[in-house]
Amino acid sequence: MDLSPFKRDIDELINEFAEGESTALADMKRVWISRKFSYIYEASPSTNLAFFMQSLYAHSIGYMIGNASLSHRLGGLYCLYCLYETQPFKPPFRIYLSIGELKKLTNLVVDAKGKGLKVVSPLIRIMLEKNMFLFGSVEINEGSVTETVNQLTELQNARIQAAYKKLLANTRMEHFLHMDLASLCATRLNPRGPEVNGQGMEVDLNVVQKMSTEYAEAKKLAIEES
């Protein structure tokens, strides 16, 4: 998958933002809108969307933690935020960020405060509160996006399977979820009960109600214990 055109678009967006040494999020939004940049998703692939989004994120993060001017670094941060907020995918793809990148992001916050920029810290706080980030230990570079996304997918699947097994294996919940209620249902449908020696066995409907109530309580207790 050739993503170079998308990366060039990001380059041009951030460079235009940094031309006048802009530092405000409002300026990035102005440039974003003037370039109709949200149309970047119109040409997104039909498959490998995780790879696509993480590649865009990684390219923006490269600016954000780089050694260029403060305007370029802020442009990377603002672009990252806008890419997340404007993506059409539901649920949205979260931004993979390594611990090393997180430390460099902290440095950006410190530098912005030193310049008297008050928007950066609240923006980071909003991104954290909205759970935009997916933190990991390995940095994504140009040659490892596919591998890292695959590893993240495998890790997520493994965690889901482990949680499923832990929930159902050898628990009271499993027992109650698989209890055979056929006899109880049959009793409800046939109040006279099964035939015994040709005689209809009378079943008190109050007993049936009691059985149903006890089952519901037992199942609730099993779920809470699990």
Image: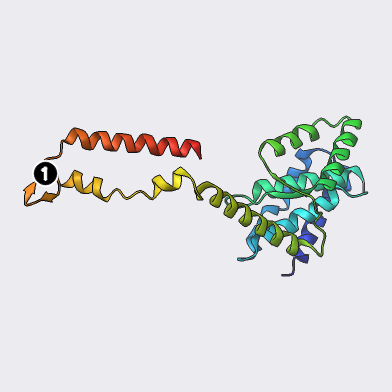
Q: x%, y% of residue 41?
A: 65, 58
Query: In the depicted view, which residue is nearer to us: 83 or 93?
Result: 93
Residue at figure coordinates x 73%, y 45% from the top left: 81
Q: Is 211 displayed left or right of 59 in the figure?
A: left
Is any part of residue 155 visible from this angle? yes
Q: Is 22 displayed left or right of 173 in the figure?
A: right
Q: Quadrant of residue 124?
A: top right
Query: In the depicted view, which residue is nearer to us: 31 or 224?
Result: 224
Name the outermost residue toward the left: 198
Secondary structure at numbered mark 1: loop
Q: Quadrant of residue 12?
A: bottom right
Q: x%, y% of residue 102?
A: 82, 43
Q: x%, y% of residue 87?
A: 64, 51
In the displayed structure, would residue 218 be above or below residue 35?
above
Name the outermost residue toward the front: 197
Is any part of residue 33 visible from this angle? no
Residue at figure coordinates x 14%, y 49% from the top left: 194
Q: Amino acid at mark 1?
A: Met
Q: Which residue is identified by label 1?
A: 201
